[in-house]
Amino acid sequence: MTTPVSPRSTSAQLASASGLFQTIQAKASFLCVGLDPDPAKIPAAFGTGVVAMEAFCSAVVEATLPYAVAYKPNLAFFEQYGAEGWAALERVVANIPSDVLVIADAKRGDIGNTALKYAQALFTGLGADAVTVAPYMGRDSVEPFTSFPNKWTVLLALTSNPSAEDFEFHGGTPLFEDVLSKSQTFEGADRLMYVVGATRPEQLGRVRKLVPEAFLLVPGVGAQGGTVEDVCTHGMNATCGLLVNSSRGILYAGGQESTVEEAKHASQAAAAKLQASMRTELEKAKLV
């Protein structure tokens, strides 16, 4: 049996930092919309179960496409439904245009041929342009992903959750700094991005010094308290170098009682508001 291949085509432009920057300039936005379809929060108007999840995600993509340069489906929300959920994820991803980055938020963290098969499943089978990876088993857990040409690997570095301090700040050199520095010696390091939480803006400057050219995927803006302005003050570089993710603040902007059209309109308005903030920061930096 052959390995499945996604029907989704991807844009060669998105495979490089310079090309991604051109996409950011074209939309005056570095917004990444997180697709975390929580069944308990999806408006009832979309239905229930897998059907509701797929319809909801598709509606959010349609509503926010003018403002987003990336979408980040969180695989756990789809995997909870087993094969039906994965099939829905495949359809959602296949319908995202090729000129928008798709980041599979999978947080894979194994090594060797196991990691290689995870990478194949997500890059080739699902059609993702990027995958989040836990780097804590070292080079062997990262290079199977970076071996795929024209694809991005997004390493967890300084995450936005409160208990990140349990491990990420430990060591003579904090672990997150080791991740940033050592991973730059890996094969394919020019196609590494890093997860750096907006809830720790004071650390963004340190991160930027260690990986001055890398793109940072920044969760934690909005519901978790981070701001676009703080992220840009500490983390923006000469090619923007940022993808700021918003999930709950966009997905559930309309509330559970909204109609389908009301939910779409609310998500669109929330995305437009964030994009306006991003345009302001890009203009201040003279990048658009």
Image (cartoon, grey):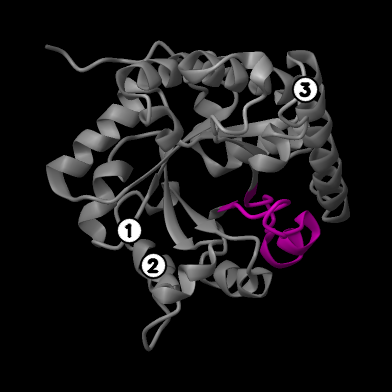
- In the picture, the quarter occupied by the C terminus is top right
Q: In the rendered structure, which segment of residues is drawn in magenta?
A: 217-243
Q: Please tell me which residue is depicted at 15% across the width and 47% down the height of the picture.
A: 112
Task: Return the disc, 3 or 1, that comes first in the chain's sequence.
Answer: 1
Q: Position of residue 59 (x, y in %)?
A: 66, 17
Task: Return the disc, 2 or 3, that comes first in the chain's sequence.
Answer: 2
Left or right: 176 as drawn, with respect to 66: left
Label 3 neighbour load within 10 Å: few <14, some 14-19, many 20+: some
Q: Position of residue 207 (x, y in %)?
A: 56, 69
Q: Is residue 222 magenta?
A: yes
Q: Nearer the viewer, residue 15 or 34?
A: 34
Tell me the number on the disc at residue 179. Answer: 2
> Residue 66 occupies which quadrant of the picture?
top right
Q: Position of residue 253 (x, y in %)?
A: 76, 34
Looking at numbered disc 1 in the image, what kind of residue is underneath it? Pro
What count of labels does the image hold?
3
Disc 2 to disc 3, C-alpha distance:
43 Å
